[in-house]
Image (tube, rainbow, N blue to C red):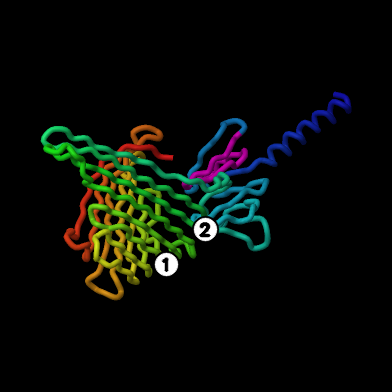
Amino acid sequence: MNTRSILQAATLVAVFSAGALAQDKITLANGDVVTGKITSMADGKVTIASPLLGDVVVPMGNISDMVTQEQVSLETKSGDSLMKRRIVGIEGGNLRLEGESTSLAMADLGRINPPPKKDPEWNGSLKLNGSYVDGNTDRRGAGMLFDALHLSDTDRITVDASWDYSENRDPNTRVFTIAQRRQGGGFKYDLFLTKKWYALFTSRVLGDTRANLSLRFTSGLGLGYTWVEDANTTFLTELGLSYLSEDYRTPGVESTDTVAARVAYRLTHKFSDKTNFVHRAEAYPSTEDTSDIYCQVVTEVVTSLTESMIASVSHILDYDNTPAPGNVRTDNRLLLSVGWSF
């Protein structure tokens, strides 16, 4: 072999060796070594792209050492993002990072190279319901429920609206009279102070013809605390003060204005990938008159029929301890609706 051939062979060996050394490396607990490119780590499993084996998924519990040749993005289990760092090994239950005295406890590691966060988007639903009865009872009605949520790392915006209308026809005069005409909406803004605590502003309006209520208006500030928040369940409570005004349709009945406490909670639970449970309550006890209290309790089950079409059954209870003269304290509504999510 001449000198030129020897130099070419040596160059190929050097290039191959450099390429092998430049690969990321995972050492398993049994001593086996997997080389390639560490692409991600999530849910306690590391994915490494091996030139020979393809994508190899290894549980973190089976890894005794890990080295990357380039910097990777690290995220803790609490969701905090760290600077990009090169991993230089595992020692004493800690991930050793490039730099002086830099390490991260393996128990705190959430993800490696997490996917880029999407810009916050609005999501929610629009649901419709209707009824038609002919015979001894002649009735027709329609309703609409709308809700939307905009969630970011720093705040949360919630908007909702409802409309419910029905009328009955007298069998003798054949004239329709209003059985229900109710419309309302709400806006809520939450500013996250910590992972659990948030400050809030909320406002709500409601009109109800059959309850002789021209307008109920509430607006106030408060604090909220998230007790549980995981992939399936969220439970939060809220406490604050609100201005509450009620303007009645009944002639001679004066409108009322008061400062009320606002006490609320919300529970959501995912029964399955398609079915969700929502239960929420909101109460306004007056700070000036202990006998004056208004509250609403909503319980709903929503299930997906298709990718965008949904169906729901909901029970809505409204309680006013001081209703307009001639009206009862409690209203119950049971609604079966279909609609679309976005």
Q: Report which residue position mark 1 lands on.
A: 221
When asked about the image quadrant of residue 276, the answer is: top left
Q: Is residue 283 left or right of residue 7?
A: left
**Camera sees residue 124:** yes
Name the spot of residue 292 as percent of width and height, x first. Answer: 25, 69
Whether 69 is among the magenta residues is: no
When asked about the image quadrant of residue 331, the answer is: bottom left
Q: Main secondary structure of the magenta part?
A: strand
The mark found on residue 58 in the picture is none
Real-space Cα separation, disc 1 to disc 2, in angstroms: 18 Å
Q: Residue at x 69, y 41 (%)?
A: 21
Q: Secondary structure at mark 1?
A: strand
The mark found on residue 154 in the picture is 2
Name the spot of residue 267 as percent of width and height, x first. Answer: 32, 55
Q: Secondary structure at mark 2?
A: loop
In the image, which residues are magenta?
A: 28-50
- Of mark 1 and mark 2, the one earlier in the sequence is 2
